[in-house]
Image (cartoon, coloured by chain):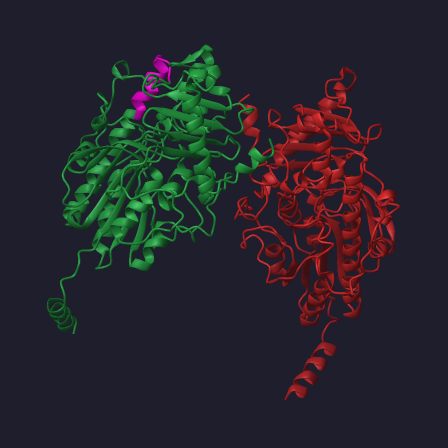
Chain colours: A red, B green
Amino acid sequence: MFRSLLALSIGFLAAGPALAAPRNVVLLIADDLGMEVGCYGDKVAKTPNIDKLAASGTRYANGFASVASCSPSRATILTGMPTHMCGQYGLAHADHNASSFKKVKGLPALLAPAGYRSAVISKLHVQPKEVYPFDEEIAANGKNVALIAEKTRDFLDRTGEKPFFLLVGFTDPHRAAKGFGNDAKLPDSIPVVKFDPKTIPVPNHLPDSPDVRADLAGYYQSVARLDHGVGLVMKALEDAKRLDDTLVIFLSDNGMPFPGAKTTLYDAGVHLPLIIQKPGQKGAVNEALASWTDLAPTILDWAGVKPPANLPGRSLLSESPPPLAVYGSHQYHEVTMYYPMRMVRTRTHKYILNLAHDLEYPHAADLWGSDSWQGILKRGDAMMGQRSVKDFLKRPKEELYDVIADPAEVKNLAADPAQAKVLNELRAKLAAWRKVTNDPWLIKDMHE
Amino acid sequence: MFRSLLALSIGFLAAGPALAAPRNVVLLIADDLGMEVGCYGDKVAKTPNIDKLAASGTRYANGFASVASCSPSRATILTGMPTHMCGQYGLAHADHNASSFKKVKGLPALLAPAGYRSAVISKLHVQPKEVYPFDEEIAANGKNVALIAEKTRDFLDRTGEKPFFLLVGFTDPHRAAKGFGNDAKLPDSIPVVKFDPKTIPVPNHLPDSPDVRADLAGYYQSVARLDHGVGLVMKALEDAKRLDDTLVIFLSDNGMPFPGAKTTLYDAGVHLPLIIQKPGQKGAVNEALASWTDLAPTILDWAGVKPPANLPGRSLLSESPPPLAVYGSHQYHEVTMYYPMRMVRTRTHKYILNLAHDLEYPHAADLWGSDSWQGILKRGDAMMGQRSVKDFLKRPKEELYDVIADPAEVKNLAADPAQAKVLNELRAKLAAWRKVTNDPWLIKDMHE
């Protein structure tokens, strides 16, 4: 009976119109990865697999997360909304307990009516379930990239004719209970790529000290493991013959887990890798400004699903002219880390509005405990790279930077009369965006 | 057949051991009611029904909410945990979206295994459902106290032999879209009790101005409506012959919705009415310190259910010696109103720790928009009653008050060397309580 059914199906298919290939999506999210990737110009990083993806897809040179905190950034990616709009104000787990508004629809909910089967392997880190109703939540140690690839193969084996949306949430190069988890027991098949602290480049937001260099070497090792995982997952897709009908997106949620990057809206926190490989496309570099609020519209565009009308972003697959600015919105990372900020960034300038500037800038537990920060404290460093520790911890209400002349974002031009025009333009841009995205913190302006 | 079954049941019951009377609970929660109640010494309030309840039950003279914000206070009442422990950091609705930790069990969950049927009429204002799994959530306009009484009668008609836990959430005297909702269309059966602004007493945290007096008159009218509702619900209980097997608790979630009271940890915000009527008990006044964290242990005690081991409170029905202090924990009211505070209060002193003291004290939207506050702003008042506007808006890290000599809590003794012993004792008490209740904000101390 099976054979006759099969014959019948084949006959039916052959007789009917040609079936459109399913338009699958694989979304690869790195955890706390900054621009320390070969194809983004890093001279030390060992990332052949991410570089290969870039060579066959489109590498976005100007991709910006909307917030540099894990759950909020993932919520932005999955809903197309900045955090003040989707409600994922902070981290989802433990005491932080932040959750997106139940009225919001995340990608799994938006894609389901179009017949998509959705799954997440390893890290998701957003809630509640009704906003992110993945059909499968597949557990795996996010640093065991061999296991993640195995789970990916399993999933691909089980896909039928339904299109799928697969989110692979690596947890490299996030910090672990100890360092970057480089000493943890992992399968021997995962190569261990070591780095010499002496030759590591120190970014402009950190002091050049032996502890920082050692900390960075651990980070680069974790990045290499992530890269190996990306390669394994891409191989699984290739073996399953899914590269021809799958949009592959690779990006990070926020910048490196070091002081001056993660949890900030400085470029080290939000200017991140983004690679999109669309079947049939050739390797390209796209210089347009791209925001993580564009990802959901992009995926919906690929899937042929109309995005919710209130989304502020655009499909990166469309031919529409790129925006002149990208935006950011941060409320808190850990629940004890309240420090709401808003950002607008053009090709030349960045404006940050610190809504709780009277507070000292708060420390994430993992960054506080890092060898890098503890070293700064122990030595009593005045500077962390080009930025002073004092400026890092105590910020004015408004920050304005010329990101071309001052890529480290340390010369605040907000009080410079010569910059008044730029300042006012960016203020107006940000105010308009906050209004259109229903920013609840606008009430604070009313009370001043 | 119905008759024979009935006969069988009656025969069975008569033949078996005497059934213990069910130990029901009715929890009446007023919304934003301070001490403006006759039996608490207010000379103007018209509250004959609450006074009658006090005359037949126990009136607690020293009852303290743990926080002066609606959702957090109700979560504390229903879980026995301060807000930093149950996770209900702020308001549950709209953009605020705060919710209790899923691992916590609220009273409906704790009472269900003992066979309780639970219901809430009108305002609940906590989430998620799994923490507060009321069997019935019965909608009703919280200011239509006639409808609330009708729904109570309905509910009592439907109670079988199972014991019940009924929460009645009035919304008087909360502010409404316009004033206190006194002009809204309500059934004619609800008496309209007007007050003369000229004869209203002005509390020590407000200026004596015509707009404040008019605002207070509206509040007192709303309190009178609440009182009428309490009378109607008590009559429903009496008519249903439930007074003999029901523990009735009346209290408020936080103090009056005026600047200087609601959302603060000053006595005007947290020193509130609490009346418990236990069947068989006579009218009494209890001077012991009582905390809203004691309510869940009290109700569980009455129900014969063992409370979770980690609850910091005690049953008010027990003979155990009363505590020497009560505590408070505030994170935010509206999500834009971050201002974490901790409090310990003894019979003689209050110590407040302002964890985000660098911020200006934030305004609740309803208090900001009130005629009272707008009047203060328009006139440019320096004082709001005995407290200066400046001191109200900008607070030091630590506040210490002698609440006997200085009931308005305006003479901060924290820097007074003569008070160092009291200060250190209260600091130690608060630190111990924060530790035992797993305060996530303790991490801030580590980072200082």
- Using the image as rendered, state which of residue A339 and residue B329 is in the foreground: B329
Left or right: B244 in relation to B96: left
Could you say which quadrant of the image residue A415 lies in? top right
At x 68%, y 26%, the residue is: A428
Position of residue A100 measured from the top left corner of the image (x, y, whole percent)? 56, 46
The percent position of residue A131, horizontal first and vertical second, equals 56, 52
Q: Is residue A212 visible?
A: yes
Q: Is residue B213 magenta?
A: yes
Give the position of the C terminus of chain A as an image quadrant: top right
In the picture, measured across the screen, residue A209 lies left or right of residue B43, that is right
Measuring 14% from the left and 67% from the top, which residue is drawn there? B13
Task: Tell me the quarter of the picture where residue A421 sits.
Answer: top right
- Please state which of residues A172 and A29 is positioned toward the viewer in this rendering: A172
Asked if residue A1 lies left or right of residue B293, the reply is right
Residue A322 appears in the rendering: no
Which region is colored magenta? B206-219
Question: Is residue A123 depicted above or below A387 in this figure?
Answer: below
Q: Nearer the viewer, residue B26 or A104?
A: B26
Q: Position of residue B255 (x, y in %)?
A: 35, 29
Residue at 58% across, 35% down: B446
Compared to residue A108, the image places residue A418 above or below, namely above
Residue at 53%, 32% (x, y): give it. Answer: B336
